[in-house]
Image: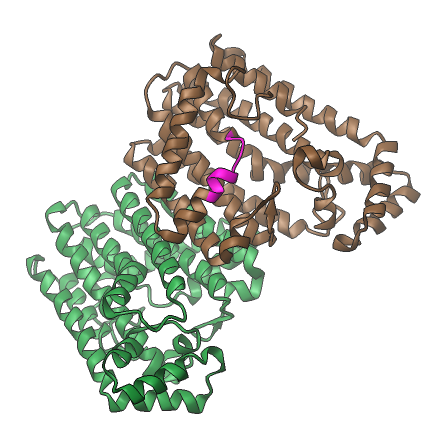
Chain colours: A green, B brown
Amino acid sequence: MSASQLPSGNGPLACIEKDLQAVEELLDRQAASEVPVASDVCRHVHRAGGKRLRPTLLILTARALGCRDDSPLWAAAAVEMIHAATLLHDDVVDGATKRRGTETAAAIWGPTAAIMSGDILLARSLAILVERSLSEVLHRLAGTATTMCRAELMQSLHRGRLDVDLDTYLEVIRGKTADFLAACCESGAIVAERPDLQPAAARYGLNLGIAFQITDDLLDYFGDPLVTGKPVGADLRERKPTIPLILALGSAPPEEADRLESLSSLGPKLTAAQFAEVQSILIRMGIPERVSGLADHYANQAVRELTAFPDTPETAALVAIAADLAHRRA
Amino acid sequence: MSASQLPSGNGPLACIEKDLQAVEELLDRQAASEVPVASDVCRHVHRAGGKRLRPTLLILTARALGCRDDSPLWAAAAVEMIHAATLLHDDVVDGATKRRGTETAAAIWGPTAAIMSGDILLARSLAILVERSLSEVLHRLAGTATTMCRAELMQSLHRGRLDVDLDTYLEVIRGKTADFLAACCESGAIVAERPDLQPAAARYGLNLGIAFQITDDLLDYFGDPLVTGKPVGADLRERKPTIPLILALGSAPPEEADRLESLSSLGPKLTAAQFAEVQSILIRMGIPERVSGLADHYANQAVRELTAFPDTPETAALVAIAADLAHRRA
């Protein structure tokens, strides 16, 4: 079992297994305490949520840096609730009816329930942090929630545009994914009361997040649907310019660039055969290797940020996660 | 000019005119600091927002209770931002293209921009409160944001149901409107460091909010569209059970109750002539007077809660607002 597939009985995450179970209980309790529809929506999104990457990063960082009390558990529940809120709102925005094979809350209970339950999760998560006197964590997480929305807006402005360059792409994924992982790790350092290691923790999370999103975007072109639980080609059909296409358009000979541009302009009308043609052009250009190489670069950079961390099982788990994420298949 | 129509040069709000101008500047600055689309959306919703009832209540309460520093201004900007966030999300949920004669942000910039900008406003408002060390205010406002969403969900469950009774209706409007006004007044008492008067401030806001929403729901049946800026009959056409219909169904003779039920089941298909028939049944039953009487009852209750407040121009303005809101025509 890989480090990114939780829960893990004996992998590198065994050291925080009880903590992760406690977070599940907090999430269950939160969902159970809601009004009827919100309760169902929260339970659904918590269950469909999957990997618990954000609570894991927060708890590992806090424990690696010597924190022994319960404060990371509340902060970890809060980050998962914020993550759930963004999933709920993103699914409404994208009109998505499925996420990783499971029907979305927006599809089951409608957009009102999804938007309002997302708002409840966002507001409750921040309230929990005040209740636990975790103001500094609250501030960092409110900041990352804002950053994610801004990046989502930027990305929606880029939809259908093929002139997005690598720097702009990296800026969007920093905001959309990586800053949140940075905030989780930084929050771990905050609850551990290690301000000296906050910057390193944040940089670990940021680089990990970039590697994570680059890999995600590569899997959208070349993943195995049976493993990822979602069909390939969704980004291209939604006309989202992501790294495989951006790198290809930036270095393709004129004829192939023209062909890629005309195929990607088809949007939702792109057939399976046409997508296979896109894949074969990209493979011929060595795009999968280049994208993987970039993900590796950021994952390695993430690991290097941990040199100042004490030598603990939790630090080892953070290293394992970085090594694993860049090579994940789902 | 009535107390509820701001800005006012010489009315009861003259005592906080500079404060309200400062809040406008904070809101302008917040909107200006946003990314492109969010900036436009925030500016639009701040401008269309109108009466600034929530900042007004917060500042009046704080000043009435002796607070002289700038802290209520930040809290006031935060409550207006939360209000703006709820308007943005409600307009997406309701599919509304106009609000009080102005096009909604969702109609102009689309649902993505409206949902994400609402999230940004919610997260930023709470972050501002941490930055200003107003944790207790933050906690109260995060609570009211949650309460509003829960009430919106409850209301959406009631849509199309005619068996909603007065108590359930009051519970929904407490959550949807009144608790937020209570939170604003309570926050004023918090920044004024008068915990002894927090409960009275909250009860003033709660009763005021109930009076406010009851009047709003009455105007939806009997308001003058030229004054309110919105057509009558929207709630009935959206099959939202509100107080005029609830009181009428609760006391109509069987024949008229049947007629009201069949007319209200028409939803969006209800014609102007049919709505006029509903109006005339309600008038014959004395519903407008009964609803006004109930609004007066809550407004008077609000004023009674102010007896423990010091005798200041700001307290007088709070009294004037309560007297005015129950009799407003827009």
Left or right relative to A257: residue A312: left
Left or right relative to A242: residue B288: right
* Residue B255, image quadrant: top right
Residue sticking out furthest to the front: A254
Q: Nearer the viewer, residue A153 or B300?
A: A153
**Residue B252 screen position, x and y as percent:** 87, 38
Question: With respect to residue A208, does B77 lie above or below?
Answer: above
Residue bounds of the magenta highlight: B44-52
* Total marks placed: 0
* Residue A288, image quadrant: bottom left
* Residue A148, image quadrant: bottom left
In magenta segment, residue B222: no
**Residue A252 screen position, x and y as percent:** 25, 84
Assign the N terminus of chain A to one quadrant of the image.
bottom left
Q: Residue at x 33, y 34 (%)?
A: B135
Residue A35, visible in the rendered structure: no
Q: Residue at x 28, y 67 (%)?
A: A169
Residue B13, visible in the rendered structure: yes
In magenta segment, residue B45: yes
Residue sticking out furthest to the right: B255
Left or right relative to A120: residue A58: left
Q: Residue at x 73, y 34 (%)?
A: B224
Residue sticking out furthest to the top: B311
Question: With respect to residue B296, does B175 lie above or below?
Answer: below
Q: Which residue is drawn at 22% across and 47% down?
A: A69
**Residue B96 screen position, x and y as percent:** 60, 51
